[in-house]
Image (cartoon, grey):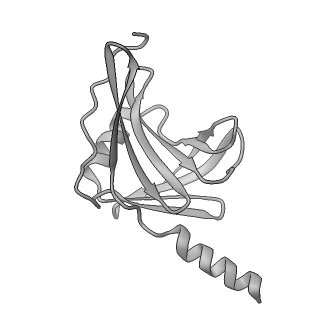
Amino acid sequence: MKKHALLIALSATIVSPAFGWEIHQFKSRPERTEILAELRSVGATLYVGCINGEAMPVLEFDMRIGSAGIDVSYRLDDGPIIRRNAGVSQDGRYLWIWQLDANEAVERLRNARRLRVSLRDITVDFDLSKGHRELPNFRCAPFPV
């Protein structure tokens, strides 16, 4: 009985929307400032920043989600549910859904109000429109710099 109540509570918590974009600036080199946008939700954080010369969205989960490739589905607003196999980091917490179409994904995230990502028994809901800051326009320097 307690196990079922815990599962229901976790399910309700996992799909709670995020709290708004946080924008961070940091020096990657003395002459170069980078921008990283971060959007938190219960169970995961969505990062958008420059990786290898292009803006790239990456998801970090609070727990290990698997290894190698993992089947995932996502939906922006009321659009179609898109299914694909996504790359997972060696530690099993980072997920790259948009490896081949990162710039297009960043634009879609910028124009959407909601992102829902599902894998196995985890669903994470990001409210992309919440808060007072929008996803910035990224100007990524060519790689390597």
Name the residue: 60% across, 79% down.
9
- Which one is in front, 138 or 23? 23
Where is residue 115 shown, x and y percent of the image?
Answer: 40, 57
**Quarter containing the N terminus:** bottom right
Where is residue 139 shown, x and y percent of the image?
Answer: 27, 25
Label tally: 0
Where is residue 7 shown, x and y percent of the image?
Answer: 67, 77
Compared across the picture, whether 99 is left or right of 119 comes to: left
Name the residue: 55% across, 63% down.
123
Q: Quadrant of residue 24?
A: top left
In this view, 73 is above or below 36: below
Extreme residue toward the top, this view: 145
Name the residue: 63% across, 50% down.
71
Q: Quadrant of residue 37?
A: top left
**Quarter containing the C terminus:** top left
- Which one is in front, 66 or 77? 66
Q: Quadrant of residue 144?
A: top left
Where is residue 85 shown, x and y percent of the image?
Answer: 60, 44
Compared across the picture, whether 21 is left or right of 69 comes to: left
In this view, 77 is above or below 66: below
In this view, 58 is above or below 112: above
- Which one is in front, 112 or 34? 34
Name the residue: 54% across, 76% down.
12
